[in-house]
Every structure is written in C-alpha cells, then in structure tokens.
Amino acid sequence: MGMSVTISAATDKDAEQILKLQYLCYQSEAALYDDYSLEPLVQTLDDLRAELSDGCVVVARLGEEVVGSVRGTVDAEGTALIDKLIVHPRMQRHGLGGRLLAAVEERLTTERSARRFRLASGHRSEHNLRLYRSHGYAEVGTEQVSRRLSLVTLEKDIAEQAYVAGV
C-alpha cells in the first residue's frame, strides 16, 4: 500500500526541502526561456525563511518528503498574490498542483481575508496557464520582462472561486 500525499502549512523545518525542490522544478522554466537567472533559481535560504515567516506557505508531503509547495501574501486591498507553485516532476500531472492551489486559496481567504487572487506565469508555460484557467483564473494583462519572457497575469475573485468549487 502506498503513502498518500498530505497538504499542510509549511514550517521553518521545511525551508531547505522547499528550496531544493524549487531549484529542481524551475530548471524546465529556465530552459524554456533560456534564462537561468530566474528569481526562484537564485533565491537564498534566508529569503525563503523570511517568506515562511511573513507569508502563507503550503506544502505537499509524501511521508516526510516535500513534493510540492505554493506561497501567498495578501495586500492591503485584499488581493492575494500567489507565487511559486511547484510540484516534483515525478508527481506532476496527478492533480497535486490544483490541490495546492485550492489549499493556498482557502488559507488566504480564511486566515488573511483575501477577496481576489492574482498570479503570473511565463507566456510559454502553457501547462501552468492551462492549470490556472481550469481553476477559474482569467488573463488580465501581459508584461514583457525581457526579450525572451513576458509574464501573463491572471486573476480570480472569491465569488468565482465558490463557483468553480461548485459551492
């Protein structure tokens, strides 16, 4: 019998595993955009620990191993900024990304009074964009970051979250 993946709040003990997983997961993005200086690839452990203490960080665990993670913060206007949704390559395409997204949305709503969600993805990251759209996010803008990369910003209101969840 195999183990189940559990989703819970991250702790400081998870910081090193999250950072290593982040580095692994963003290799494909770096290759896609031919840019190995993407922020998730150069983030320090201290910076990640600061995010753990200030933001809402959720992890997926298979036993003791962190196999996924996502982060979020809420600004003064109630907009939750969701960032760095990662799933170990061997665990991808099994719904874990969607489960993590739903978990961080729930926490940001109940614990930090989020009224809408915002996230961004590279314009060539079709799998990511498809995931976000399937969870009710709609494109609200595109910003050219470099010659190779444009960031697509997507948003979803809390009312849309309830609709998508079938509430």
Image (tube, grey):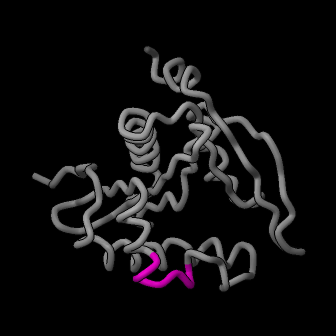
Q: Point out the residue furthest to the right here.
A: 147
Residue 2 placement (x, y as % from top left):
15, 54
Q: Point out the residue furthest to the left here.
A: 1
Residue 20 placement (x, y as % from top left):
39, 80
Nearest the viewer among 49 and 162 is 49
Left or right position of 52 against 71: left
Residue 133 placement (x, y as % from top left):
64, 37
Q: Is residue 145 above or below residue 3?
A: below
- At x 46% / y 73%, what residue is drawn? 22
Task: Say whether residue 42 is magenta.
Answer: yes
What's drawn in magenta, residue-wise? 41-47
- At x 49% / y 20%, what residue is drawn? 162
Image quarter of residue 160: top right
- At x 72% / y 61%, what residue is drawn? 122
The secondary structure making up most of the magenta span is helix
Nearest the viewer among 50 and 99 is 50
